[in-house]
Amino acid sequence: MLLVTTSDITKRLETEQQLLQASKMATLGEMATGVAHELNQPLAVMESASSFLMRKLNKKEDIEEEHLLIMAQKISSNVDRATRIINHLREFGRKEDAGLEKIQVNDLLRRANELLSQQLKVRGIEVVWQLAEGLPLIMTDPGRLEQVFVNLLLNARDAIEDKLSTKGIKKGSEKIILTTSSDGDKITIEVSDTGTGIPKDQLEKIFEPFFTTKSVGKGTGLGLSISYGIIKDCGGNIHVRSKKGEGARFIIEFPISNDS
């Protein structure tokens, strides 16, 4: 006698997608202040250039062709920059079906950093790049992996700010270090910070849903759990090394695509 059992996993997959999208929206909310800084810079340049032109026109003063061209180029290039930021945000928040494709992980790290670079700079946090060039391609979902990188950057930012808020701690060398390398059949990505670190008794819980070391109102406790699931779904591994007070290092490993 042969017994066959089947189960409909559609509901579970729908729930997972909803949770993933909710996490994306929460991440966008955390990035809101930083995005305002990112957009403020090109807007300030455009305002300055247009004000210069209006002053000249109101005074009926001649504008040299060279100056006019420079102002027009500044306005045009900064419109392009603001458009890129807005389109990037729209793409990041868009609900999309998961799909694996070959990607260059260095490009995706740089893309994730674009969304946060200005707010990290304003906070005095230096991003240190230690990327191996010419890395083989990996097979992954680029949209979801970018979400992982953004989550890790936000966690690093918060850990550094928490350390600076501790009484007696002075500003020094606040850094987030982004490292990539290849070794045999795998690619390794590391996101390290000089923040508070994670106590030993919390390391095993760090990827559990709703577990967070942040204060109430900061974070959902889903970021690292969602990130863990994304990495596993894409065939990779993620783990963390840390000591309290000495920062944290998140290590992601992906197999190299066979025909890279």
Image: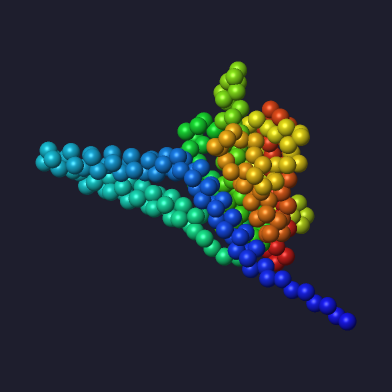
**Left or right: where does residue 110 sit relative to residue 36?**
right
Q: Work out which residue is located at the far top of the displayed protein and give it.
A: 168
Residue 38 spot, x, y in % from top left: 43, 42
Image quarter of residue 195? top right
Residue 133 in sight from this viewpoint: no
Q: Classify 199 as above or below 144.
A: above
Residue 209 spot, x, y in % from top left: 67, 47
Q: In the rendered view of the protein, which quadrant contains the C terminus?
A: bottom right
Q: Work out which residue is located at the far bottom of the displayed protein and give it.
A: 1
Q: Work out which residue is located at the far right of the displayed protein and give it.
A: 1
**What kind of colouring is applied to the model shown?**
rainbow
Image quarter of residue 165? top right
Residue at 40% x, 49% y: name it.
Answer: 81
Residue at 49% x, 55% y: name it.
Answer: 93
The residue lying toward the viewer, choosing from 172 and 34, is 34
The residue lying toward the viewer, choosing from 214 and 190, is 214
**Left or right: where does residue 88 sit relative to residue 178?**
left
Residue 242 spot, x, y in % from top left: 72, 35
Residue at 59% x, 29% y: name it.
Answer: 162
Q: Classify 156 as above or below 87.
A: above
Q: In the rendered view of the protein, which quadrant contains the N terminus?
A: bottom right
Residue 107 spot, x, y in % from top left: 57, 53
